Image (cartoon, helix red, strand yellow):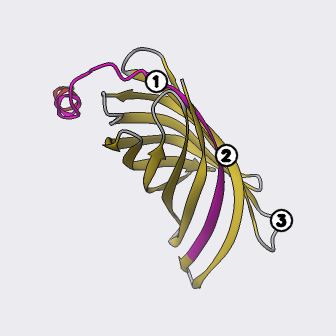
Amino acid sequence: MKYLSALLLCLGPAAAYAAGSVDVYYVDTKLKAEVSGGGLSGSGSVDGDGYGVRAELPVTQNIALVGEYQKTSYDDTDGDLKQLRFGAGWFNETGSGLIVQYVKFDLDGSKADGPGVYGRLAGELTKSVRAYGQLGYHFLDDDGEDLKGLEYGVGLLLGTPGGLGGFIDYRITNLDEDVNGIEGKTDFKDLRLGITIGF
């Protein structure tokens, strides 16, 4: 517990954050998969696009509920990927903080879910431009098998807090699985562009 307390102190003073928002966005995506081991070897990738919505809803001055739903469809296939995320975060006055979420990936009925933990660094570049970076790790269950990996992203928010603005960000999710000596690696790369409504 003392290490968590020290980390929260390093993030800065617990000044009033209390910034809520709802974002709606378009996403351009790329899925890459690799399989190796057990006499198998192969890789492939496919492009796609879709949409999503995400929100931060303040509960106290420094704690907010967070959630996201994203759906993407892939070119030349009938494949759809649905992502659902919800949880809570602690944020300081700049928007930096710690987030814990339940995460669910549903790829054409093949589902994996579990917790995700993320650290976010955010700051103001100008009065109307803010930047953020986020690093996290997923601990998912895929029919009894562990599916784990890093997630990282960077983004820009345009506009003043509490008003109408826009954002652009780039997120990469790596998920790795080892089943009876067969290793699977999946990468999701999402470029997202949307509007944000602050309150």
Give the class, few, some or many, for how many residues have Cα within 10 Å of label 3's Cα (few <14, many ≥20).
Answer: few
On screen, residue 182 versus residue 124, left or right, reads right
Left or right, 8 with reference to 175: left
Q: Is residue 31 magenta?
A: yes
The quadrant the N terminus occupies is top left
Q: Give the mark nearest the N terminus, 2 or 1.
A: 2
Q: Is residue 134 left or right of residue 68?
A: left
Residue 122, given in percent of the width and then of the height, sits at 34, 42
| Residue where numbered disc 1 is placed | 64
Rendered residue at 55%/64% (across/down): 189
- The residue at 31%/33% (across/down) is 94
The residues tagged by marks 3 and 1 sit, at their Cα atoms, a distance apart of 36 Å
Residue 70 visible, this orientation: no
State whether residue 77 appears in this view.
Answer: yes
Q: Is residue 37 above or below residue 144?
A: below
Residue under the image location 54 percent in, 69 percent down: 184
Spot occupied by residue 160 in the image (x, y as percentages of width and height) = 45, 34
Residue 52: image tag:
2
Q: Which residue is mark 3?
A: 78
Kindly state the secondary structure of the residue where label 1 is placed: strand
